[in-house]
Image (cartoon, grey):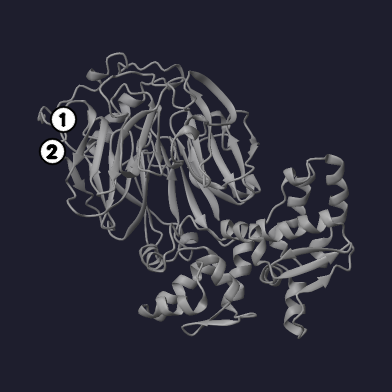
Amino acid sequence: MFRIRGCGQNILNKLQINKDETDVKDFTETLHKEVVYVSSARTHTCFSTTQNEIYIAGRRKTFKQTFQLESGFVKKMASGLKHTIILCENGQLFVTGDGSSGQLAFGEKTNKILNLREIQMFKDKETFVVDIACSLESSYFLCENGDLYGLGNNAHGQLGYESLTQKQFKPNLISRDVKKIFSGYCYHFFYIMEDDKLFGCGLNDKQQLGFHSTNIVTKPVEITFFGNKEIEQISCSYLNTLFLVDRKVYLTQQIEDLQSFEVEESNYNYRNNNYRNMNLNNPRIVFNNTNTNTNTNTNTNNRTTNYSINLLNFTGNENIVSISSGLNHHCFINEKNEIYVLGENHKGECGIEEPFFDTPKKIIKEEFEDCEQIHPVCGYRDTFLHVPYISALQNQFYTLYRDSIGTDCDILGNKAHKTVLQFRTGLEVDKLNKKLEIYNQKEVKTFLYWVYSGKVKNNKLLINMCSELGIKNPHQKTLQSDLINLYNDKESMDFSIITKNEKIKCHKIILFIRSEMFQGMFLTIDDESNEIGDYTEKSVQAMELLIKFLYYDNFFIEDLPNEKERKIIYNELIDSDEFYQLDPNSCYKQKLKIFLK
């Protein structure tokens, strides 16, 4: 989970402040929620919370809960100029904002959506969507089988085909066998193939694609500048692109172009779509390029060698772990949580008061020094920082491991719990011990830290270890999603609570971790019984909801759609957190009150 810090432009009062913020401000308390993801367009900012809610800030000058996701936790959010796409782990897609160019994927012109609406277009595809990206007025969808689709504005070739149009309502197949996609607040786009080849297309008047060419590249071009090196991240702004390679930051073109862009960008009027210095009806003359060194092979799949990609020359360009870009500013963070900003800062988007940085500027924030790895999320003209902290649910699991409470097995000298290891890794203890023998104690502890907290200390190590163990996508395999899967695995439930002569099944380990009352009872009473009576004599419905809360850490209205029934259940459950001694930080009563509403 994350706390959210933010700074920058405050159009439509979308962050509930009266002016542009030039200091990094904590918005978590404003939301009163634990935030998982944030994504910011010019007109709005979207937040997803641990309660599987989506908040949109901006349109009505206040935070407003707009949607409770019924199934599937948010996997990724991406924003363009005026639209946002939300991808859930189960493949569901939701959108909000402007769709006048077709970027909302409804197959027709959609001027404005103020709430969230589900996309049905990709439900007919053979596989569901696993990744998304947005440029200013375009959207990209990567399917599980590697097919990559794009729609929206193609006036600059950013959808990868030659018909330059501002409105593309049907999805265009850009490529097959794709594994990663990247874009941003720009008119260009990149993707990486399964064979690790990098391709790019779109507006290239300032060499945003990393090579000299015509102003517009309509057919994706292979970019071979980095050879066989792994490209860890790509982050796109309007004029430049950042590449994170070997934990160092590379930038397309010269940074002086950012400075010259200040005057030109100030002449735009995005609200009326009236570009004074840009001609969207004739995009081939956008920003007449003074670099006349043009390669005639840039609209073919031949390799381009005249590159304009430079290693950023500044002290500290090493061990960079995360990069992000807005319209005309960049932010990157190293493994020590040192923050660097670059580019335009007229709206405070870089978190300090100076208007512009042509070399990376280091921002010192002592509060992050002892924090786990933080990550930047640049919006259109604002910046957010994902600051990890362990939620109440994660803390309960990790404390159990750290203090060796109620352990019943051993992983290469580290005390652990069989059931936790089983539902988190899918492996029995003996098999897990055998596979982990090749790692040292520090590496094993790093792995167990992920098992119990869901947090990642060493990204590369965890991926390698999970690959060895046969665990796919460890970053997506969250503690919360595994608990939901455990709740639905009725056959593995090994304990029952009897209420009103009915047995409600659950997992003994969940009662042990989540309730101090049960934990104390299981530790002090030497009883192998697999059931217990509920002395509070709750109704079956109430006890079922309480048990589900221990897994989901939330209540769901769809479990009791009848308002009258919810009020009855509310009265039965209101004091259960005190009786069963649930963690106060789990916000039990607050979540129960929201459920009642």
Please name which of the two marks, 1 or 2, marks the residue nearer to the observer: 2
> In this rendering, does residue 383 appear at all?
yes
Comparing 41 with 158, the one in front is 158
Q: CA distance from mark 1 to mark 2?
A: 9 Å
- Res. 16 visible in picture: no
Ranked by sequence position, the earlier of labels 1 and 2 is 1
Image quarter in which the N terminus is found: bottom right
Residue at position x 31%, y 26% in the image:
263
What is the quadrant of residue 578 in the picture? bottom right
Residue ID at (49%, 43%): 7
Percent coordinates x, y for residue 197 in the rendering = 23, 46
Labelled disc at residue 213: 1
Describe the element under mark 2 as helix, strand or loop.
loop
Indicate the quadrant where residue 148 lies: top left
* In-image side of 243 versus 50 (left or right): left
What residue lies at 36% left-to-right and 19% top-to-bottom? Answer: 166
Marks 1 & 2, CB-CB < 8 Å contact: yes
Rate crowding at label 1 as few (under 14), some (14 to 19) or many (20 or more) other CA atoms within 10 Å.
many
Residue type at tag 2: Thr
Q: Position of residue 557 (x, y in %)?
A: 74, 44
- Of 190 and 252, which appears nearest the observer? 190
Instruction: Give the number of the disc on residue 304.
Output: 2
The residue lying at 79 percent from left, 73 percent from top is: 531
Q: Is residue 390 above or below residue 558?
A: below
Mark 1 belongs to which amino acid?
Ser
Tell me if mark 2 has few (under 14), some (14-19) or many (20+) residues whose alpha carbon lies within 10 angstroms of its own: many
